[in-house]
Each structure stands twice: as structure tokens, then as C-alpha cells.
Amino acid sequence: MSQESVKAALMQAIAGIQGNPGAAKVVFRADTQLEEDVRCCAQVREFAPIIVDEPPELGGKDAGANPVELLLVALGACQEIMYSAYASVMGVQLDGVKVNLRGYLDLRGLFGLDPAIPAGYQKVIFETEVSSTADEATLRKLVQTVESHCPVLDTLVRAIEVHGSVKLNGKVLEAEPLAA
């Protein structure tokens, strides 16, 4: 898909939403299932299943990326997609975009060894490399636009509502609300 076809698709989507604001509300879905040990299988739309596993030191067989690695992948890919999308709409020629990410996690939180340490990432750092012949002012505007509209970045930096439920042998298990 060329930059012009990306722009055309996005402009058509924007026009559709402007004509029918209710069309802006979408739901994305994924289904996952534990397969064996700590290996899981994820299904998104009609794509091939995604294998999710842990490295051997965390009980897995390294058959795929683990969930916290996939979170980094989601952020990096979302940034790259947003650069492509907004560059096409803004008429900015991109020669390349690459994102390097690191997530810092303390396993004491994961294993419940210290209640003061969160189970998830304590810090995520991403470094984006953009190659373009556009002028610096244009690229600064592109960067600001991408970073203020990237859905995954927004989800990570903003508190959002998350609800879950558990069925135990087909019966809903009443549980405490999820911690904030």
C-alpha cells in the first residue's frame, strides 16, 4: 500500500465517522487459551494463532514472545503505524521508522515476594528513529501528533477502566474488584 492509498483509506474512514459519529465506537477482540505449562494460544480475527510463552527461566519453552514483550511490540508497532498514517495525511515523506523499546520489570513483584513492588513494568522506554527529508519543524509536528494520538501509548500512560470476571467450572466466581 502506497502513502497515497493509506491517506485515501484514512480520509475515507474520517469522512465516514464525520457522517456517522456512532461508527467511531469500535470494539477489538482477542481470545486466549492456556495450552500447556505456561504456553498460550491467542486468536485475533481470522489470523493464524499467536503462540505466547515464557523463557525457560520462567517455566516456559520459549515457543513465542511473552505477554510483557508483546506489550512492548504493541507500543512499537502502534507508534510506527501512527507515523505512517499521520505522515500520509500530512504529506510528509517517510523513508523509515523504527522503534527500540525496553521494559523494566522487577520479578519480586511478579512472584509476590515484595508487596511494595508492582507485578508489571515499572518503566518503559522507547526510542523512535525517523528517517525523512522533511524539515525539522514539520517532523516536530508529526512527532507531537503521533505521540498525542497513539492508542497504545495513550492506554499505557492514562488510567483506564478494566473489568474482569472468572468462571469456575461454569459458575461466575465472585471476586474483589481489580486494584487500581
Image (spheres, grey):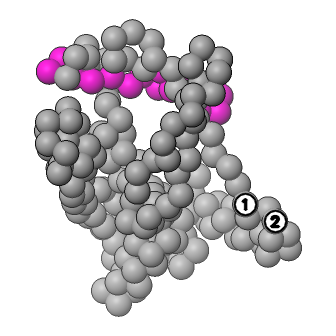
Residue span colored magenta: 41-57
How many angstroms separate mark 1 from mark 2 (CA)?
A: 6 Å
Is residue 12 in view? no
Residue 7 magenta: no
Amino acid at pointer 1: Lys
Locate the C terminus by quadrant. bottom left
Image-based side of 82 in relation to 55, left or right: right
Residue at (44, 64) in percent of width and height: 159
Above/below status of 38 relative to 2: above
Write down the quadrant of residue 169 in the picture: top right
| Residue at the extreme right | 19
Write down the quadrant of residue 71 in the picture: top left
Amino acid at pointer 2: Gly
Q: Secondary structure at mark 2?
A: helix
Residue 25, labelled with which disc? 1
Above/below status of 150 relative to 59: below
- Label 1 with label 2: CB-CB less than 8 Å: yes
Residue 47 magenta: yes
Q: Secondary structure at mark 1?
A: loop
User: Residue 122 location in percent, x, y?
Assistant: 21, 55
Q: Mark 2 = which residue? A: 22
Residue at (43, 67) in percent of width and height: 158
How many numbered markers are drawn? 2
Image-based side of 140 in relation to 111, left or right: right
Residue at (41, 84) in percent of width and height: 141
Above/below status of 3 relative to 63: below
